Amino acid sequence: MSNTIQVSGVSAFKDNYIWVIHDKRHAVVVDPGDAAPVLRFLQEQHLTLAAVLITHHHADHVGGLPGILAVSPVTVYGPRSEAIDGVTHLLAETDRITLPQLGISFRVLDIPGHTAGHIGYVGEGWLFCGDTLFACGCGRLFEGTPAQMSDSLDKLASLPENTAVYCAHEYTLSNIAFALTVEPDNARLQQRALKAAEDRRQSRPTVPSTLALERDTNPFLRCRIPAIAQAVESHTGTHPVDTTAVFAALRQWKNTF
Ligand code: ZN
Ligand code: FE
């Protein structure tokens, strides 16, 4: 990997991040929900678009495709089991893609739960996980079951701990508020809350995080920890029979938090 390569976040809508991987000449864009801010960034930075990566079919992740492709008709990678206009290369787990303009490659993970065909891209120490894993949270279950989402999060949690987690939304402060309700005595989570609050006060993104930090502070990756199961049991008044039941109750709790 070239050491001049970087990942920049382009803000879109209220709280989306459109990630742009670039080396000062070529760019790969992840989940362009809106065309205008992406085209502006590419122009300002004098970047030539090489490809687009899509994680799932929601409009805030694909809505910019027509506008971008009208300007730069590039290869668009996306999930095999979701119908998305503009996607040219369908991907599923075990697939690998190479982006020669940037000299980087990714492997593809199936991470269903938020949507049925959601995929993630892992490579070069980065994870682009769309709306599956968030900083200190996880996506809502629109099309999948708790068991699917729980398996998907386990898959992501097993990646190397220094993996940089590039999720698609700035939801961190509200996720941390929920996490602290679930696990108030987690010292690393308390530290994270202070750091994230300061970052947001300075208008800095809290993303990317790392998998190490997520494993230590994200309640949705901590369903096996007794304190989390205990908090869920106190909240629901029901003993969760297994870690999937802990996850399901935790996700339900967050939905109404
Ligand atoms: Zn989504
Ligand atoms: Fe989204």
Image: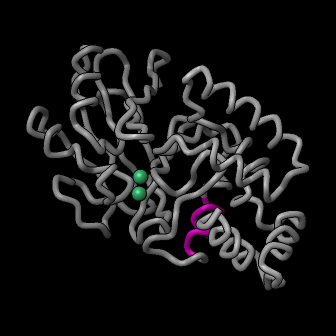
Coloration of the structure image: one colour
Q: Residue at x 22, y 18 (%)?
A: 43
Q: Position of residue 151 (x, y in %)?
A: 61, 69
Instruction: Please determine whether, in this image, residue 5 is positioned above or below residue 187.
Output: above
Quarter where residue 199 is shown: top right
Q: Looking at the image, which residue sits at the far left? A: 70
Q: Tell me: 205 left or right of 161.
A: left
**Observer-nearest of 38 and 201:** 201
- Residue 138 coordinates in the image, percent (x, y): 59, 57
Rendered location of residue 214, percent (x, y): 70, 47
Q: Which residue is outermost to the front?
A: 256
How many numbered discs?
0
Quarter of the rendering occupied by the C terminus: bottom right
Main secondary structure found in the magenta portion = helix
Q: Indicate the quadrant where residue 100 lies.
A: top left
For residue 129, above or below residue 1: below
Name the foreground residue: 171 vs 88. 171
Q: Nearer the viewer, residue 60 or 202?
A: 202
Residue visible at 62% across and 39% down? 163
Q: Is residue 254 left or right of residue 53?
A: right
Q: Which residues are magenta?
A: 148-155
Q: Is residue 146 magenta?
A: no
> Could you tell me which residue is drawn at 44 percent across and 54 percent down?
108
User: How far across and how far down the image is residue 45, in percent?
Assistant: 29, 14
Q: Left of 214 or right of it: where is 50?
A: left
Q: Residue at x 29, y 27 (%)?
A: 101
